[in-house]
């Protein structure tokens, strides 16, 4: 299944310092939300997925996020990926502004109701790299 390969490959868990128990806990949590691998709407939006982009508060507003995103997109292109994807929590306007500013376009959105109002929702974005 692609989920395992995409979201918790061994090299990523090693980089994060996760042991097998932590990887399994993440897998169960992830699949608890995105739990139907046969539902095409839950498939990753692209083969090169960017996650957890953040800039410390004192460095915000200086173009750091845009620079990071451009570097990540160039790396994905260098590795031969045709598309990149990223998700953002609903109402995170600063992140949405950065992602759309570097060319990402909305791929799909899940509102709060999808998560039984336990989460504000998420928007998935995608950009062509080639």
Image (tube, rainbow, N blue to C red):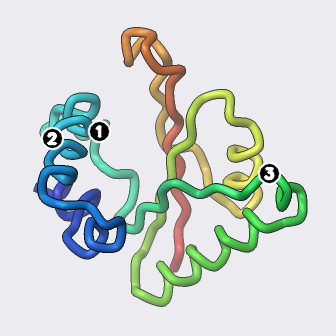
- Report which quarter residue 79 is drawn in: bottom left
Upstream in the sequence, badge 2 or badge 3? Answer: 2
Residue 57, numbered circle: 3
Instruction: Assess disc 1: are there few (<14), some (14-19) or many (≥20) residues with their C-alpha within 10 Å of its C-alpha.
Output: few
Whole-number angstrom distance, CA of label 1 to CA of label 3:
32 Å
Residue 11 vs residue 87, the one in the foreground: 11
Query: Where 62 sits versus 79, above or below?
Result: above
Upstream in the sequence, badge 1 or badge 2? Answer: 2
53 horizontally vs 25: left or right: right
33 horizontally vs 66: left or right: left
Whole-number angstrom distance, CA of label 1 to CA of label 2:
7 Å
- Report which quarter residue 6 is drawn in: bottom left
- The residue that mark 2 highlights is 37
Q: Residue at x 28, y 46 (%)?
A: 43
Q: Residue at x 69, y 44 (%)?
A: 96
**Coordinates of residue 86 in the picture (x, y in percent):** 51, 53
The secondary structure type at the circle numbered 1 is helix
**Coordinates of residue 84 in the picture (x, y in percent):** 48, 65
Whole-number angstrom distance, CA of label 2 to CA of label 3:
37 Å
Tags 1 and 2 in contact by the CB under 8 Å rule? Answer: yes
Q: Residue at x 47, y 37 (%)?
A: 108
Residue 16, numbered circle: none
Instruction: Assess disc 2: are there few (<14), some (14-19) or many (≥20) residues with their C-alpha within 10 Å of its C-alpha.
Output: few
Query: Where 64 sits versus 125, above or below?
Result: below
Query: Where 31 sits versus 55, above or below?
Result: above
Tags 1 and 3 in contact by the CB under 8 Å rule? Answer: no
Tags 2 and 3 in contact by the CB under 8 Å rule? Answer: no
- The residue that mark 1 highlights is 42
Most extreme residue toward the right is: 62
Instruction: Assess disc 3: are there few (<14), some (14-19) or many (≥20) residues with their C-alpha within 10 Å of its C-alpha.
Output: few
């Amino acid at each position: 299944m692609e989920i395992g390969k995409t979201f918790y490959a061994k090299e990523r868990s090693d980089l994060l310092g996760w042991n097998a128990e932590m990887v399994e806990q993440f897998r169960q949590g992830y699949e608890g939300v995105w739990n139907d691998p046969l539902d095409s709407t839950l498939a990753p939006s692209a083969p090169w997925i960017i996650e957890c982009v953040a800039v410390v508060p004192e460095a915000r507003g200086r173009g750091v996020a845009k620079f990071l995103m451009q570097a990540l997109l160039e790396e994905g292109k260098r590795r031969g990926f045709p598309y990149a994807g990223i998700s953002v929590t609903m109402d995170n306007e600063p992140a949405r502004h950065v992602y759309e500013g570097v060319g990402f376009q909305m791929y799909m959105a899940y509102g709060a109701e999808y998560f039984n109002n336990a989460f504000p929702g998420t928007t998935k974005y995608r950009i062509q790299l080639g």
